[in-house]
Image: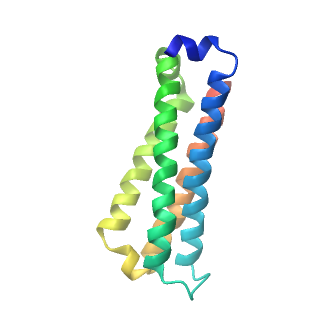
Amino acid sequence: MFTALRSHVWAYPALEVVHIVGIALLLGNLVLFELRVFGWGAAIAPRDLARLSLSLALCGFGLAALSGLVMFATQPQELLANRAFTLKMLLLMLAACNAAWFHGRGSLARLDGLARAQMLLSTLIWLAVVACGRWIAYL
């Protein structure tokens, strides 16, 4: 299967498109929810928006993770030696820890200063993940 991805002219680019769609769903919905945390769309209940936007963000993460794993399987040695890839993986772990902290402390119910800082940190981490993903091809 993985050799077919490398040898078929459209397979790997199609997989990259799936990866990018996943990233767009993830980051777009996180930013939408962050805007609510910062007070935009105050008429929308945070829990209602979270139910929709975070569910879509999770679907996007699933698409990006599955397609990323398949892309990784096509060239694991090269990627493990790539500093941008290593940094991307570390940032993904940091994003997971931040999300666990956000939900674990009940930030959704509070929407306090710390919740805002966590959401801003989340967005910055995910933007850094995207930047590292792009840099993988150049390092």
Q: Position of residue 39 (x, y in %)?
A: 58, 83
Residue located at (55% from left, 70% from top): 34
Residue located at (49% from left, 15% from top): 1
Q: Position of residue 85 (x, y in %)?
A: 53, 31
Query: Is 101 positioned to the left or the right of 89 in the image?
Result: left
Q: Position of residue 102 (x, y in %)?
A: 38, 66
Residue 132 shows in the view: no
Query: Is 112 positioned to the left or the right of 38 in the image?
Result: left
Q: Is residue 138 above or below residue 21?
A: above
Residue located at (57% from left, 87% from top): 42
Query: Is 97 positioned to the left or the right of 131 in the image?
Result: left
Q: Position of residue 106 (x, y in %)?
A: 32, 74
Residue 131 found in image quarter: top right
88 and 47: which one is in front? 47
40 and 131: which one is in front? 40
Residue 110 shows in the view: yes
Q: Is residue 86 above or below residue 46?
A: above
Q: Is residue 112 above or below residue 56?
A: below
Residue located at (65% from left, 33% from top): 135
